[in-house]
Image: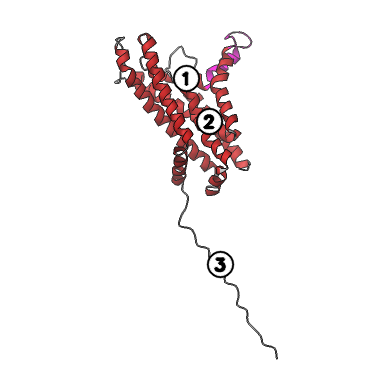
């Protein structure tokens, strides 16, 4: 006699939605924590602050009385500290590639454009705030020295004081974004830093070697659109400058956006 047995149908697994969802605000906090807990960040910030204030004081002691616009003493060190901003932006990206942490980052947030945007915002804000505070402190530190030359920063004048400070801080943020974009494009710390050095320091030297007239004048003309030249024209605009303030602003914006867009395109198509 055969006994029939009834096998119950398998109960489908019930998926419960996790109450924890990563928002863009959370992504920003994550990037802020990462950049704040890396030792190289504070080395870069510390060297930037020390160089800015030190060079500003040295300029005030040597040529302070010859400055047409006293605020130039505080913002002139950007020619040296811009490299540190670019390097800081690059290492915030390449550091994760070198340790493999980028895979965890992209697993937590698969929307790769969100990861790039968060890194760019945190790096730019950090550099802008750091630069603005540092340039302001440099201006205050050099005030007693400039007073000996019967000159001083006019804090009540926006175009002569606050606008150059904001423009210099914006330029430093652009240099950091340039580094972030190149970091995503190249992925190598040494390669990204070399590219930053080449764009910020080497190319201006190369273009300056060509005459302003003749068949190679276009190379000299291109030099006006490099980040260093554009930042100088934005900080202290002049009717005699190669670029107007608006042209310099557009040029710097392009130098920030183009590498970021290239990095975003490659980040979407390449494996981590």
Based on the displayed image, in which of its 4 quarters is residue 67 positioned?
A: top left
User: Badge 2: how crowded within 10 Å, few (<14), some, or many (20+)?
Assistant: many
- Rounded to the nearest angstrom, the CA distance separating label 3 from label 1 is 62 Å
Q: Secondary structure at mark 3?
A: loop
What percent of the width, then of the height, locates residue 261?
56, 34
Residue at image point 66% right, 85% down: 4
Instruction: Say if the magenta span includes residue 112.
Output: no
Q: Decide if residue 48 is in sight here.
A: yes
Color style of the picture: secondary structure
Q: In the image, which residues are magenta?
A: 209-226
- Rounded to the nearest angstrom, the CA distance separating label 1 from label 2 is 16 Å
Left or right relative to 44: residue 258:
right
Q: Earlier in the sequence, mark 3 or mark 1?
A: 3
Q: Earlier in the sequence, mark 1 or mark 2?
A: 1
- Rounded to the nearest angstrom, the CA distance separating label 2 from label 3 is 47 Å
What percent of the width, then of the height, locates residue 108?
52, 49
Q: Quadrant of the N terminus?
A: bottom right
Instruction: Say if the magenta span includes residue 223.
Output: yes
Left or right relative to 2: residue 32:
left
Q: Is residue 259 above or below residue 105?
A: above
Q: Nearer the viewer, residue 205 or 97?
A: 97
Residue at image point 48% right, 58% down: 18
Residue that badge 3 annotates: 13
Q: Nearer the viewer, residue 170 or 126?
A: 126
Mark linked to residue 79 = 1
Residue that badge 2 annotates: 179
Residue closest to the far bottom: 1
Q: Secondary structure at mark 1?
A: helix
Residue at image point 51% right, 28% down: 86
């Amino acid at each position: 006699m055969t006994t029939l047995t009834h096998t119950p149908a398998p109960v489908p697994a019930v998926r419960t939605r996790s109450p924890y969802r990563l928002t863009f605000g959370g992504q920003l906090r994550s990037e802020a924590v990462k950049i704040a807990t890396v030792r190289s960040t504070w080395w870069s910030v510390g060297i930037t602050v020390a160089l800015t204030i030190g060079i500003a004081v040295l300029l005030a002691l040597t040529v302070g009385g010859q400055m047409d616009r006293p605020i130039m003493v505080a913002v002139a060190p950007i020619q040296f500290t811009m490299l540190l901003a670019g390097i800081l932006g690059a290492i915030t990206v390449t550091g994760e590639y070198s340790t493999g942490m980028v895979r965890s980052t992209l697993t937590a947030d698969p929307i790769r454009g969100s990861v790039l945007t968060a890194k760019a915002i945190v790096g730019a804000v950090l550099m802008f705030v750091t630069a603005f505070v540092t340039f302001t402190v440099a201006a205050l530190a050099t005030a007693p020295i400039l007073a000996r030359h019967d000159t001083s920063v006019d804090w009540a004048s926006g175009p002569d004081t606050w606008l150059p400070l904001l423009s210099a801080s914006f330029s430093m943020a652009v240099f950091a974004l340039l580094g972030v974009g190149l970091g995503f494009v190249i992925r190598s710390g040494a390669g990204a830093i070399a590219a930053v050095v080449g764009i910020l320091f080497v190319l201006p030297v190369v273009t300056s070697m060509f005459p302003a007239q003749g068949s190679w004048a276009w190379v000299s003309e291109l030099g006006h659109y490099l980040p260093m030249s554009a930042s100088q024209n934005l900080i202290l605009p002049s009717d005699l400058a190669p670029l107007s303030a608006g042209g310099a602003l557009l040029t710097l914006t392009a130098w920030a956006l183009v590498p970021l867009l290239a990095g975003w395109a490659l980040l979407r198509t390449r494996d981590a």
